[in-house]
Amino acid sequence: MKRKGNYAFSNDRGEKRCNKRTSKVFKKYIRSVGYDEKFTMHHLRHTFASHLVQRGCSIYKVSQLLGHLDIKTTEVYAHLAPEKLHSDLGLLNLGGQASAGMTVVRKSAEG
């Protein structure tokens, strides 16, 4: 489908489509394919962010794409890529040796 304007959901003039109308049309399609009506457009947004994190996109970049004002809002996705913490340690090349012996120190709940 050819998109007009800068919005994912826009009218024929490229203007932002009303959220209420977009949600109504979305629900219609959800029903037509037999999905649970509890499935919302927010689920699409969450899935988008989850897939980005699982494929190695940084939390910072995901935060920007989602338009979050506070990185803490995006941190709910961090658990989806714990191996990224360890693989990024490889970025530290200390004297030609990989940083395989390094470990991640995690802050405890007590501080």
Image (cartoon, rainbow, N blue to C red):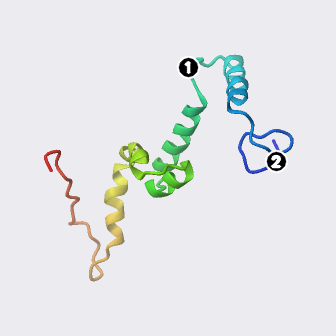
Where does the image place residue 54, in percent across and percent down from the top left?
46, 47
Q: Does label 1 or label 2 sit earlier along the sequence?
A: 2
Q: Quadrant of residue 32?
A: top right
Residue at 73%, 25% (x, y): give it: 25
The N terminus is located in which quarter? top right
Query: To which quarter of the image does residue 91 belong?
Result: bottom left
Q: Position of residue 110 (x, y in %)?
A: 13, 46
Name the residue beneath numbered marker 2.
4
- Label 2: few (<14), some (14–19) or many (≥20) C-alpha neighbours in 10 Å: some
Nearest the camera: 101 or 47? 47
Labels in figure, total: 2
Residue 77 relative to residue 49: left or right: left
Quadrant of the rendered image containing residue 86: bottom left
What's the CA distance linking mark 1 and mark 2? 29 Å
Mark sitting on residue 63: none
Label 1 secondary element? loop
Residue 25 in the image: above or below residue 12: above
Q: Is residue 12 left or right of residue 110?
A: right
Identify the amino acid type marked 2.
Answer: Lys
| Secondary structure of residue under mark 2 | loop
Q: Would residue 84 appear left or right of 103 to someone viewing this image?
A: right
Q: Position of residue 29 (x, y in %)?
A: 71, 23
Q: Residue furthest bottom?
A: 95
The residue lying at 46 percent from left, 49 percent from top is 53
Q: Position of residue 5 (x, y in %)?
A: 79, 50
Residue to which mark 1 is pinned: 38
In this view, the residue farthest toward the left is: 110
